[in-house]
Amino acid sequence: MSIDTTDNTLFVTTAAGEAASAAGAPTTTDAGSSGVTPAAAAGRPLDPAAAQITAARIAPARAPIVSCEQCGLCSSACPLTGVEEFNIRRIERAVQLGVVDDLLRSRLPWLCTTCGRCESACPNGYKIMTTTRTLRAMIAPELAPDMAPCRKACPAAMDAPRYIRLIAEGRFADAYAVIRETAPLPGILGRVCAHPCEDQCRRNAVNQPIAICALKRFAADEGAAAFPPVTIAADTGKTVVVVGSGPAGLTAAFYLRKKGCAVTLLEARDEAGGMLRYGIPAYRLPQEVLDKEIGDILDMGVDFRPGTALGEQVTLEQLRADHDAVLLAVGAQESRKIKLEGADHPDVLWGVEFLAAARAGREMRLKERVVVVGGGNVAVDVALTALRTGASSVSMVALESRAEMPAFDWEVEEALQEGVELLPSWGPGRILLDDGGVAGIELVQCTSVFDDSGAFCPLFGEETRELACDQVILAIGQSTDLSFLDPKGAVLTLAGLIDVDLASQGTALEGVFAAGDAAAKALGTPGTIINAIAAGRRAAAAIDRYLGGDGDLAETLCEAGDPPVYTGEREPGFADRERVAMPVLEPAERVKSFVEVACGFDAEAAVHEARRCLNCDLEIVMAREGGPVSGT
């Protein structure tokens, strides 16, 4: 018994059937199959012309099947065995018997990562992935993924598979161009992006995800110099004012200027960047990277006006009168405050303002023992900055358990490596003062942080403890300042944020849009840099349409050229390649200065890491086209 395939269905044939198929005649299923073709299962008739079988299409599906002995070594080696009932041996058995209808109605063939471990384990050299790909080619389109999971997870839909593949080919400048097709600021993103793409990377199921963010940084560091000047469309005669020069405002200014609008960018502080500049320490985001990428945007002809605060130097009404459209991207640049006994003492600081002062280069010297209250990324950066500005010991107190802390795991690990003491499941009770100032902090045990619905609702027990310290920094979150809005005006707020249409970033006031951390977001959407960039891009497209343009920001900056053919063959040992570790400074060296901690990949490391990619996007195209495809 062997497997024959057509463009639309799967056939199990006997020897007589094989002879018929070789002659080009359609065959029928034998008693081992239910006889229901995928076309019939989907409720559509089978096109006889599309069902013509050719030897070329039969061969790759038939050849491996005859050598399968159902020994089970493939499923033992497979990292996905048992996940959603996936078992590659059972799938092969179903194909052998021709009982494939249920497979073709399920996601099972798409659960396979095509890492190749099964083929490496097979004693007969069975090309197991060929069968998997044959099933994928016949599965109902609605069950197939529409794009690689890493790209789908990216708020900006950045084509990570393509730029990773270009790095693997040594085409670093082209990889940078692909990144720039979707977003500006690649060097910044390559250092501080939350990289949700890596959480969804299929390589997770094999061993570790691809270092997508680090590869983005490598492409930016290596390929930016060869990138040509940005092309700016003809002047549209339209003017747009963007309030706030953080990631959302910079992104919107970039795209609107490219579309030919005259763009004015207002910033309340002295320099552009928003929380990129005033909230992220230089050991994560070096000054020269920040200045270079922001400068590239301003050099496009953006009229940058620092020291101009909305509600102080200018009003929203004035901006509306002087410009065709307004984008509010004011960010969340203040610390969230809580009422806490002793918090008004001069030795009690607030996290966001502390980071801003440190980044602005203000002379500051902390006392010996510092306690940081908070469990998020800001709190981690406050703790590490405290170590670099004089504190000899830093303790970090968080309401959440270690597993619940909202800070990124890798940032918490960095803090632990540098000597920060972590005290999870404790909350602040009061600041303890004596004649000399802060003497300590009273902590209260936190028994739970979230209610049954997942909403923030901390509960506290009776246990308390006192922690001696000389200074306390409260870093419990960020908040927005929307005092420039008229409470009775047309621009509405929602839970302390500007209420916007989530598709267009438009407010209820005509011609006024909002994006970034100050604007409402879809439920569960975190306030990350990549989300702000995606929102800035959406706002730019909507504003362009509002001003009479087409709103199309898509562009091709890297031509395909003459790409290699992707067949899906895996080299020996491919599945076992470990993720390349980012080289970093030793902890003892880190705390001495604000020098960048992560050193970046060299070319050899970047290419090696990029070659771990499973090429999920090309696997989708292979299924759609029924065979090998162009690789880039």
Image (cartoon, grey):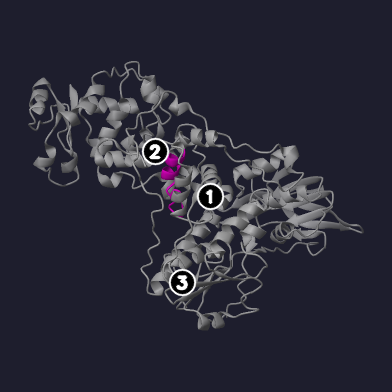
Residue 73 in the image: above or below residue 176: above
Q: Name the residue under label 1.
A: 225
Q: Is residue 377 shown in magenta?
A: no
Residue that carries the numbered disc 3 in the rendered image: 261
Q: Which of marks 1 and 3 is nearer the N terminus?
A: 1
Gap between marks 2 and 1 measured at Cα: 27 Å
| Secondary element at tag 1 | helix
Counting other residues with Cα less than 10 Å from the Cα at mark 1, is it few (<14), some (14-19), or many (20 or more)? few
Q: How many marks?
A: 3
Q: Earlier in the sequence, mark 3 or mark 2?
A: 3
Task: Please name the residue shown 10% across and 26% down the image.
Answer: 22
List the residue tagged with mark 2. Answer: 615
Residue shown at the point (55%, 60%) measured from the top left: 296
* Callout 3 amino acid: Cys
Assign the N terminus to one quadrant of the image: top left
Indicate which disc, 2 or 1, sits on the residue closer to the N terminus.
Answer: 1
User: Which residue of the protein is positioned furthest toward the right in this rendering?
Assistant: 435
For the record, the magenta segment spans 153-167
What residue is drawn where x is 69% and y is 60%? 352
Q: Vertical placement of 178 versus 114: above or below? A: below
